[in-house]
Image: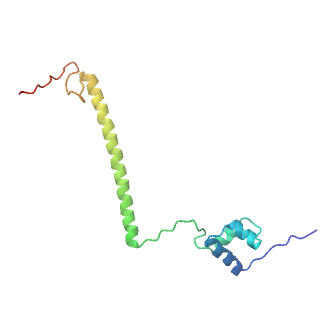
C-alpha cells in the first residue's frame, strides 16, 4: 500500500504566498506557480497570516470624533425616515377623510370646495 505524501510548508513560505496574494496575484496562479495542491490552502494561510484575511474587505478608519459624528448622522437619518413615514400616513389619512366627506356631503372639496352641482360663476374682468 502506497502512502500519500503530504507537503509541509514553512511559515516563511506561507507568509510569502500571502504577501504575493495581497499584492494582487490570484490564488489560482499562486497554486500553479508553487505547486500548492489544495484549493482552500491559500485561504487558510490568509486567515492565519494575512491582513484582515482578504484583499477585498472594506476597511474604514475613523477617529473617535468621526465615529461619533457618523452615529449622530445615522440617528438623524432614522428620525427623518420615521418622520417621512408618519407624514405619508397623515397624507393618506387626510385623503381618505376628504373622500368620505365628498361622498357624505355630496361635495368636491378638492376642486370647488362646494356642492358638486354648484358651479362657481366665472369672474369677468371690468374694463
Q: Residue at x 36, y 61 (%)?
A: 73
Query: Is 74 above or below relative to 37?
Result: above
- 5 left or right of 98? right
Query: Is 20 above or below relative to 112?
Result: below
- 39 left or right of 122? right
Q: Quadrant of the N terminus?
A: bottom right
Q: Residue at x 34, y 42 (%)?
A: 88
- 37 left or right of 106? right
Query: Is 103 above or below relative to 46?
Result: above
In the figure, residue 9 lies in which quadrant? bottom right
Residue 21 x, y percent position in the rendering: 64, 71
The residue nearer to you, when weighing 2 against 16, is 16
Residue 126 x, y percent position in the rendering: 6, 27
| Residue extending farthest left | 127
In the figure, residue 12 lies in which quadrant? bottom right
Q: Quadrant of the C terminus?
A: top left
- 25 left or right of 96? right
Residue 70 x, y percent position in the rendering: 39, 64
Amino acid at each position: 500500500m502506497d502512502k500519500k505524501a503530504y507537503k509541509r510548508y514553512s511559515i516563511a513560505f506561507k507568509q510569502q504566498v500571502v504577501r504575493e496574494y495581497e499584492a494582487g496575484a490570484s490564488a489560482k496562479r499562486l497554486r500553479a506557480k508553487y505547486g500548492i495542491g489544495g484549493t482552500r490552502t491559500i485561504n487558510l494561510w490568509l486567515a492565519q497570516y494575512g491582513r484582515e484575511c482578504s484583499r477585498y474587505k472594506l476597511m474604514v478608519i475613523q477617529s473617535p470624533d468621526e465615529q461619533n459624528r457618523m452615529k449622530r448622522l445615522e440617528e438623524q437619518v432614522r428620525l427623518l425616515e420615521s418622520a417621512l413615514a408618519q407624514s405619508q400616513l397623515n397624507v393618506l389619512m387626510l385623503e381618505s377623510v376628504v373622500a368620505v366627506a365628498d361622498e357624505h356631503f355630496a361635495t368636491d372639496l378638492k376642486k370647488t370646495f362646494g356642492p358638486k352641482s354648484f358651479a362657481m360663476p366665472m369672474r369677468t374682468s371690468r374694463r
